[in-house]
Image (cartoon, coloured by chain):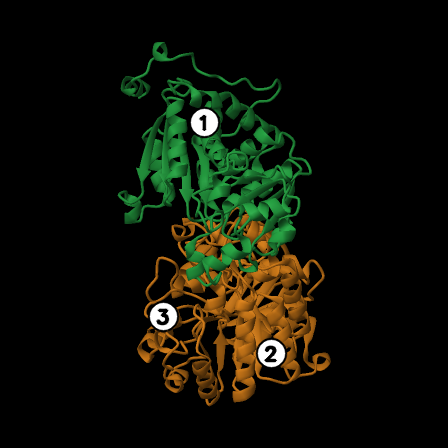
Chain colours: A green, B orange
Amino acid sequence: MSQTLQAQSNFTQEDLPSNAVIPVSPQGFKWERKHVIDSSQLSMAEVHEVLNTARSFAGILKRPVKKVPTLRGKVVVNLFYENSTRTRASFELAAKYLSAELMNFSIDTSSVKKGESLIDTAETLLAMGVDAMVIRHGSSGVCQQLAKHFGNRLGLLNAGDGQHDHPTQGLLDLFSMTARVPDLKGKKIVIVGDVMHSRVARSNIHFLNLFGADVHVVGPSTLLPHSVEMLGCSAHTDIESALADADIVMCLRMQLERQRSGTIPALSEYTRLYGITSERLTRFCKADVLVMHPGPMNRGVEIASDVADHPEISLITNQVTNGVAIRMALLYLILSTPS
Amino acid sequence: MKLLLKGGRVLMPALKNEQASEKSMDALLDVLIEDGRITAIGDNLSESDVDTVIQLKKEQWVTPGLVDIHVHFRDPGQGSKETIATGALAAAAGGFTTVCMMPNTSPTIDSVSVLEYVEQAARKTKINVLTVPAVTKGLEGKELTAMGTLVSKGAVAFSDDGMPIESAGIMRKALEYAKMFGVAIVCHAEDPSLCGCGVMHEGYYSTRLGLPGIPSSAESTMVARDIELARQTGGHVHFAHLSCKESVALIRQAKKEGLNVTSETTPHNLALTDATICDYDPNFKMYGPLRAADDQAALIEGILDGTIDAIATDHAPHTPEEKLLTFNEAPRGVIGLETSLGVILTHFYHSGKLSALDVVRLMSTAAAECYGLKDAGILRQGMPADITVIDPELSWTVDPNRFFSKSKNCPFNGQTLQGKAILTIAKGEIVYDESGLLDGKNQAELLASV
């Protein structure tokens, strides 16, 4: 199989500006994880390993030839049960930059529509020689169920499960934040919006706590989940007090669906109460405040265009770039771990 | 055929309107069974003419056969999950001699013809399988079933269990109508507009796991509504599978006011909380959902002070394939017939919260009284010989692969429990035995005959 895959690849080592980038781990640390499915499972040492690895891969994105043979012969499947363009593309490019073969498994045209179970689909792909799967699914916990079934026979990356977790997003956000604010300890980070339905918020709350940040969430009470404080944050419904002296503001996507389901009365009211505008940032936050958004943005709803596009304040483009580096790092780490 | 149980600890709680000091029984006695009836209970009963003498240890309990007033046997229509035959086997193995089947089969038990099919299959089992037909046709919550006719054919109560009766107007009519026949309406308390797409208790753990929550109010608002309808109509409402502290408080108050309400909770709601749903195992998904620790504490208080009359399993079989689905998608329900007694003894008798008589009351005598069953839950002379012999100390490990139930969806998988039914006698016949006390008869023969 590996011969076939090499034959398909157009690249040989001679074409490349350098040899494979092989990140060096700190002494005494050995990455042993085949699955990254739950933010809370990662230890501090593992998080640093991911960030360090991503740092050594980030440079590849700026090269004229964006391809290294580090994962040549490895096969990754994007198994997306939910619509996604950005995350899927990010994983796809991450795999390709490392010379892994990537296949997008389209759920619409597959037997999944005919009732095949997720485990059967994954078993089938594994039998075809797949090394790792990147999974996005609308139901929380599917990655745990798959991990329980497959153990170390298969690499697994959670690309977002239901409202539960989105570890690669949490890690890329952490990467983007620490690039600008190296020590997050005691920094006030405010997550704004639909926390209830947000796996991004849950992942971020976890990593920010791990790094000692002062985490706050703010949003309409109908979109703050029960006992959210117990995740390790202060909860607000008032934007002013939430934003007071904030170092970083993280917007969440506000979906029109919330208006239809009666959770909020109107997007316009949401914007009036919680929209992140330069006026609000200037009035309440620290002078050097940074703004983030996991995308896709609803400009003019949860974030004003001038904020999103502001070259000093907005980290949004950095997040997108760093997403590829983080996913390269995670693919590299889990695929270098023996089965 | 004469059968003598010698020397066990005979336990029989007082009935609802009796003085416990006079009528409850807890003594080392012999029990004589003749032709399907209990003919004598006393000291040193004579062994002459007795066909089988079973010598028990004084630590072993002799109790009225256990009664489960809430089971789903999926028959007709979903035989891959359970049938009346396999459900009855599971019941016998769990120490139950009487079970009451809920009507959400396919087709629904909402007509005489379907009820007759069920009764016929029930008569082929060796235990008492009774039927709780639907309140409304097709469980649609719109038109009442022919309750009068169904009662004359054996119905013991009515329920749309699995579905709430959303219309308060229909619930009112159901309570008024059922009152004429002296039967209860069993309420599955769930307001769908509050439950939404919820799959577990709304609280810290649903937030952490990212699973949509079911607020306690989804249950308690309907409990409150139906208490008011019981007040208005004088009808009997029985609340099924209670899960939250708010419902317990409402029912406690209703009982204080003398309203005609009874209630049950489940072994899983008593023994587990939402904190146990840690790895998204759909075998922990059911309605009423596992709730928070303070809800669990309120349920325990409820069974201790009589607010909750009975423990019922809500035995709800689903196939392993269905329970391989995601937590969101998998069907609700867990089985319980073969673990109920062990769970209650382990968690509540051995911990000192419940006495032996409390266990028998909650799992047999008072459970039968909820539906007004005259021939169940009573271990007295002249009554049908439905008897369970329990070894409260026997330690065993739950292994769903060894269940008699067709389904394996059990949240207690792998737990070691202390206490088990070792001999089940229904209608005077031994229907389950793992006592090792019977000569010449082995388990396989017995089971083949059930």
Chain where mark 2 sits? B
Q: Is residue B377 visible?
A: no
Which x, y percent locates residue A269? Answer: 50, 59
**Tag 2 residue:** B380
Chain of the residue displaying label 1: A
Mark 2 vs mark 1, CA separation in Å: 75 Å
According to the picture, the residue beneath numbered tag 3 turns out to be B121
Dot 1 and dot 3 residues touching (CB under 8 Å): no
Give the crowd class for mark 1: few <14, some 14-19, many >=20 residues within 10 Å.
many
Q: Position of residue B259 (x, y in %)?
A: 60, 84
Q: Residue A320 falls in which quadrant of the image? A: top left
**What amino acid is found at the position of numbered circle 3 in the picture?**
Ala
Q: Residue at x 39, y 17 (%)?
A: A69
Q: Nearer the viewer, mark 2 or mark 1?
A: 1
Marks 2 and 3, the one that precedes in the sequence:
3
Could you tell me if the residues under marks 2 and 1 are in contact, i.e. CB atoms within 8 Å? no
Query: What amino acid is labelled 1 in the image?
Result: Met
| Element type where label 2 sits in the image | loop
The image position of residue B411, as x and y in percent, is: 52, 53
Indicate the quadrant containing the C terminus of chain B: top left, top right, bottom left or bottom right: bottom left
Chain where mark 3 sits: B
Q: Amino acid at mark 2?
A: Arg
Q: Circle 1 sits on which residue?
A: A328
